[in-house]
Image (cartoon, coloured by chain):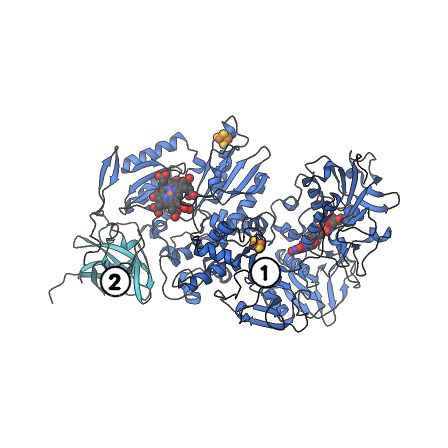
Chain colours: A blue, B cyan
């Protein structure tokens, strides 16, 4: 290459992969020697196409999906021209022709609109793929759509407003995504698939029919093994004619596969693969050494990859090649695990038993809608691939077994049978368990036996196993549990003797069945009458899923004493009263009220570590009268008692502090009011600091926000206590709306999936994939759950009411607050106080000598 | 059998199902519970581990065959039939006889 002169790179296409290329070019210093011009056809910068469906529920629409929110790269040497199409490549002259509407050209290109020509030294094709629309008669009618861009979704949404029914043609991955969208838009939804089953590329017949049952339960009608013959209607679609029936519909979405967009390459005579896609070598170079192709338009070695991860890998390879690095792309793992319409589906390795002599082991439970298949080698020693539908929890253990070639246990069916917790993996000590960090089984056993690690989180800290991609966490967990089982220590993951389920499993069971009463839950899924472990856990799950008062008859007796009396019990049986003081901000009038109440009831007062005031020593029967005084003065419960949001601590921020860059007090108050009352697996605390000096100690909280010049940085997973943890960065420079959306998702994801009494830091550590997983779900919305989580939070926020006020207003809830049922006027004689530093202090009750014969 | 004083304490349905109330019987605090099957039990209200008069505020459930209440203070379970602490063999709280007459709960002497 010519040195001295800056080289010009032209990238065609600003989709996910074109964007990754530009990003990597900046990050890896390629722009020090190269100028980059990116030309994109769509009207907006690259966005997360993988999460396209979540656009329907996203609070900030397209902005929320954007991969380049400002629309500009942080490097002036990268220029992005949108709404413009590359129409021609002249390989001899090394130029491209770009057609732009006048508005898109702006001052970036001197010519006001129309046609411009740009020279390149390196051309990168990243034109992606286009949906394939089969040649069905009538496919051009109004009401026919594809499912690829935000514009497609906008059009589908508009059409749905006046429609009642929708048909998706194609029952593959993307077709089911589209069906999901139509269901969300309230249409009576049909899926038509030519193949005899859904997802024919990933699933076999039995898996496909299991999936059909799940999908039909959601109201989608599935028609498989049938060809679409005609789209009916004059100009506007009115129906779809199949071989043997007609479906009335106003909306048709074609999702019958994708075709690489290789037209530009064909027109300038670059080689293309027989099945389409620009043919490239291991460095992603086309038959012209000045031209590269990456992403879905490329066919490395003749194969195109319809997934984003291989495209990203190709983008990195080309940046590497231009930096004279050694990187190559030699194929990608096409394993998939996803949640479709809420159903777990995974397909990995040789899922169809194509290997010579391969054997299949299957497990299916038609009632529960579970199908699992393992493909093993002829001699039964190695796992080759598999399919999981309805329960993909084993994916984390199984997939690494395929790639590492670990020997299968003697009874491999154990791997897919339900409750396969005690699986003996028969793994030799030297087997590598975590490939990201090169940790062997022996290393893990050493950490458990010699270094005192008792759980995944500890082993992760000690050995780094599971701290990168997270796919080995399930195996690590099994090894730890097997070890404890072998030394006779019982590890039961169930909640208690009444439930064999974990909290997360219970949460899902309650959500799926819509239970509202402990009795129904214990009858269907447990035994006996419960205890102080499962009852509060279920009360918390019910509180998270409904917005009913915790002292309603159905749940009152499930509550732990603090929740039952809406205060914290103290050592002598009295309670403390903590009114909410959002963000720690309080008016003098309210301070005076707290002082008066404390004085009038003789309570001990103390400023807490949570920026508010605690009043101690209230007798149970006094609680309602005390609350009344406080509620009348505008206070509400501060939930110091609940496993729920406590406080959002603030620093004084930009209002007063000379260093502050944002209004931290305002945000802390808004967040505390938004999340107040949210019942969670453990208590939750937040903090907001007005600048990087961090006076609010936000990073010591479950969620911490620190102001930046551009917005807010969001940190998660911090706490104090016995095992302090510093919160880690989840996302940076957010505007307030995005921050709140991410927090909504983060908190709901935690509420849904954490174990009982697990703070956010331990939850994140034990999650497969750790913080990266959280980022995928919360920021990248890889599960497509974002909208759902936000909707749940919106329900919580909308349903909030002050628990103290609601109790005061309901005489039946007040009945509980008497000292003695037969002598309501008599105070508990065991409670007595002395005075210390001018305030009351409890006198330890005369203890019945513990240990004395009764 | 010596004569026993029965104290009428409250209507049966004043005790929540799988919950408890505190009653004053002969100057002592007694915790009266109703289990899921409708049975009524009475034990001393004072939690021997903290000395606080709070057992009636515990969560009612079962441990194996035993109907239990767990102390709201430090969570030890007590067998409602015998008062025996199931987490510490050496600890027991007093039990009281109960009878329900015409829908009213009566508590008798310590058993
Ligand atoms: C009152 C207060 C101490 C004080 O006088 O300042 C306090 C008091 C209690 N703390 Fe705390 N904590 C208080 C601030 C803190 C803080 C500081 C903070 O929030 O900035 C921490 C460390 C930060 C954190 O939580 O990460 C803290 C870490 C704990 C822990 C350890 C949590 C952990 O994850 O390891 C517990 C134990 C638990 O929750 O299981 C605990 C538990 C308790 C309990 C609820 C123990 C109990 O069950 O009786 C105490 C009863 C409070 C009451 O009766 O009202 N308290 N506690 C503070 C109340 C704050 C508030 O306004 O709500
Ligand atoms: C609904 C949906 C769900 C998906 N789910 C997943 C998933 O779960 N997992 C997964 O791995 N993948 C998924 N995918 C696939 C994933 O989105 C693609 O693999 C990825 O977007 C490919 O990136 P790309 O840059 O190659 O193509 P694209 O993102 O399509 O970008 C190509 C861009 O080039 C532009 N362009 C084309 N020709 C020209 C031209 N001549 N001039 C200028 N610009 C041009 C196009 O307009 C487009 O903006 C999904 C796709 C869809 C539609
Ligand atoms: S964190 Fe920054 S803005 Fe807040 S009080 Fe400290 S120095 Fe001031
Ligand atoms: S394999 Fe262990 S973290 Fe990736």
Picture coordinates of residue A716, whole percent (x, y): 51, 44
Mark 1 C-beta to ligand 4 under 8 Å: yes
Q: Which residue is drawn at 61% across and 52% down?
A: A782
Q: What element carries label 2?
A: strand
Judged from this view, the residue extending furthest toward the front is A430
Picture coordinates of residue A532, whole percent (x, y): 35, 57
Residue A400 circle label: 1
* Residue ID for mark 2: B41
- Indicate left or right for A141 with A546 as reference: right
Q: In the rendered view, would you say A733 is above or below A330? A: above
Picture coordinates of residue A689, whole percent (x, y): 50, 35
Quarter of the image where one finds residue A169: bottom right
Distance Cα–Cα, label 2 vs label 1: 56 Å
Q: Is residue A638 visible in this depiction of the protein?
A: no
Q: In the rendered view, would you say A249 is above or below A124? A: below
- Indicate left or right for A235 with A204 as reference: right
- Indicate left or right for B68 with A248 as reference: left
Is disc 1 surrounded by few (<14), some (14 to 19) or many (20+) residues within 10 Å? some
């Amino acid at each position: 290459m010519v040195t001295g002169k800056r080289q010009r790179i032209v990238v065609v296409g600003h989709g996910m992969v074109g964007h990754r290329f530009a990003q990597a070019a900046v990050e890896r210093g390629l722009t020090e020697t190269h100028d980059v011009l990116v030309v994109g056809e769509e009207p907006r910068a690259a966005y997360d196409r993988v999460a396209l469906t979540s656009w329907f529920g996203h609070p900030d629409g397209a902005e929320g999906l954007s991969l380049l929110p400002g629309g500009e790269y942080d490097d002036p040497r990268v220029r992005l021209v949108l709404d413009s199409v590359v129409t021609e490549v002249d390989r001899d002259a090394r130029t491209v022709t770009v057609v732009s509407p006048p508005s898109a050209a702006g001052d970036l290109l001197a010519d006001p609109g129309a046609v411009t020509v740009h020279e390149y030294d390196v051309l990168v094709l990243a034109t992606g793929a286009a949906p394939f629309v089969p040649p069905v008669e009538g496919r051009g009618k109004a009401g026919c759509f594809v499912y690829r861009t935000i514009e497609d979704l906008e059009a589908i949404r508009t059409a749905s407003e006046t429609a009642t029914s929708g048909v998706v043609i194609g029952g593959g991955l993307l077709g089911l995504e589209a069906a999901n969208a139509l269901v969300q838009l309230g249409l009576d939804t049909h899926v038509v698939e030519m193949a005899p089953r859904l997802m024919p590329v990933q699933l076999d017949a039995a898996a496909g029919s299991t999936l059909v049952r799940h999908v039909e339960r959601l109201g989608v009608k599935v028609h498989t093994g049938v060809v679409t013959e005609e789209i009916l209607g004059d100009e506007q679609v009115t129906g779809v004619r199949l071989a043997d029936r007609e479906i009335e519909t106003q909306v048709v979405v074609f999702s019958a596969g994708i075709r690489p967009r290789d037209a530009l390459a064909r027109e300038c005579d670059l080689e293309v693969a027989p099945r389409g896609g620009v043919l490239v070598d291991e460095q992603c170079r086309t038959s012209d050494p000045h031209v590269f192709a990456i992403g879905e338009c490329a066919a490395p070695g003749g194969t195109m990859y319809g997934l984003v991860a291989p495209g990203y890998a190709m983008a990195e390879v080309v940046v590497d090649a231009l930096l004279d690095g050694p990187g190559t792309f030699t194929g990608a793992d096409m394993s998939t695990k996803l949640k479709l319409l809420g159903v777990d589906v995974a397909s990995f390795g040789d899922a169809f038993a194509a290997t010579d002599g391969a054997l299949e082991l299957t497990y299916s439970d038609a009632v529960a809608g579970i199908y699992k298949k393992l493909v093993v080698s002829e001699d039964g020693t190695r796992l080759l691939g598999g399919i999981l539908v309805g329960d993909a929890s084993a994916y984390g253990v199984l997939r690494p077994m395929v790639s590492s070639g670990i020997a299968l246990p003697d009874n491999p069916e154990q791997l897919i049978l339900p409750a396969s917790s005690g699986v003996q993996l028969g793994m030799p000590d030297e087997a590598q368990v975590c490939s990201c960090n090169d940790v062997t089984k022996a290393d893990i056993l050493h950490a458990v036996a010699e270094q005192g690690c008792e759980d995944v989180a500890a082993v992760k800290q000690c050995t780094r196993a599971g701290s990168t991609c997270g796919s080995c966490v399930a195996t690590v967990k099994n090894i730890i549990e097997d070890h404890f089982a072998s030394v006779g220590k019982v590890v039961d993951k169930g909640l208690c003797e009444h439930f064999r389920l974990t909290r997360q499993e219970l949460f899902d069971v309650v959500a799926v069945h819509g239970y509202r009463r402990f009795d129904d839950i214990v009858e269907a899924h447990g035994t006996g009458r419960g205890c102080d472990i499962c009852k509060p856990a279920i009360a918390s799950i019910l509180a998270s899923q409904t917005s009913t008062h915790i002292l309603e008859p159905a749940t009152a007796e499930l509550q732990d004493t603090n929740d039952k009396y809406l205060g914290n019990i103290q050592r002598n049986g009295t309670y403390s009263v903590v009114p909410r003081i959002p963000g720690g901000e309080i008016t003098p009038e309210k301070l005076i009220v707290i002082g008066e109440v404390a004085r009038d009831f003789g309570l001990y007062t103390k400023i807490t570590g949570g920026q508010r005031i605690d009043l101690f020593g209230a007798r149970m029967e006094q609680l309602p009268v005390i609350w009344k005084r406080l509620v009348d003065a505008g206070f509400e419960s501060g939930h110091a008692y609940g496993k729920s949001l406590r406080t959002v601590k603030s620093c004084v921020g930009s209002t007063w502090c000379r260093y502050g860059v944002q209004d931290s007090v305002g945000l802390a108050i808004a967040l505390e009011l938004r999340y107040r009352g949210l019942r969670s697996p453990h208590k939750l605390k937040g903090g907001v600091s007005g600048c990087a000096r961090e006076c609010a100690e936000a990073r010591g909280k479950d969620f911490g926000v620190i102001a930046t010049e551009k917005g807010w940085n969001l940190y998660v997973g911090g706490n104090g206590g016995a095992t302090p943890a510093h919160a880690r960065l989840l996302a940076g420079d957010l505007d307030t709306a995005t921050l709140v959306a991410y927090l909504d998702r983060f908190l709901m994801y935690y509420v849904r999936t954490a174990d009982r009494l697990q703070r956010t830091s331990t939850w994140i550590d034990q999650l497969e994939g750790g913080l990266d997983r959280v980022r995928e779900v919360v920021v990248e919305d890889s599960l497509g759950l974002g909208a759902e989580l936000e909707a749940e939070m919106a329900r919580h926020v909308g349903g909030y009411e002050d628990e103290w006020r609601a109790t005061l207003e309901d005489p039946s809830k007040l009945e509980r607050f008497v000292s003695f049922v037969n002598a309501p006027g008599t105070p508990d004689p065991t409670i007595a106080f002395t005075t210390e530093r001018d305030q009351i202090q409890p006198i330890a009750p005369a203890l019945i000598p513990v240990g004395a014969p009764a | 059998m010596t004569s026993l004083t029965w104290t009428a304490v409250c209507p049966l349905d004043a005790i929540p199902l799988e919950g408890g109330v505190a009653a004053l019987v002969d100057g002592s605090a007694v915790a009266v519970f109703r289990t899921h099957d409708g049975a009524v039990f009475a034990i001393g209200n004072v939690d021997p581990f903290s000395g606080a008069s709070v057992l009636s505020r515990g969560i009612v459930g079962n441990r194996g065959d035993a109907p239990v209440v767990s102390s709201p203070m430090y969570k030890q379970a007590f067998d409602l039939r015998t008062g025996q602490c199931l987490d510490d063999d050496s600890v027991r709280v007093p039990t009281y006889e109960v009878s329900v007459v015409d829908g009213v709960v009566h508590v008798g002497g310590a058993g």
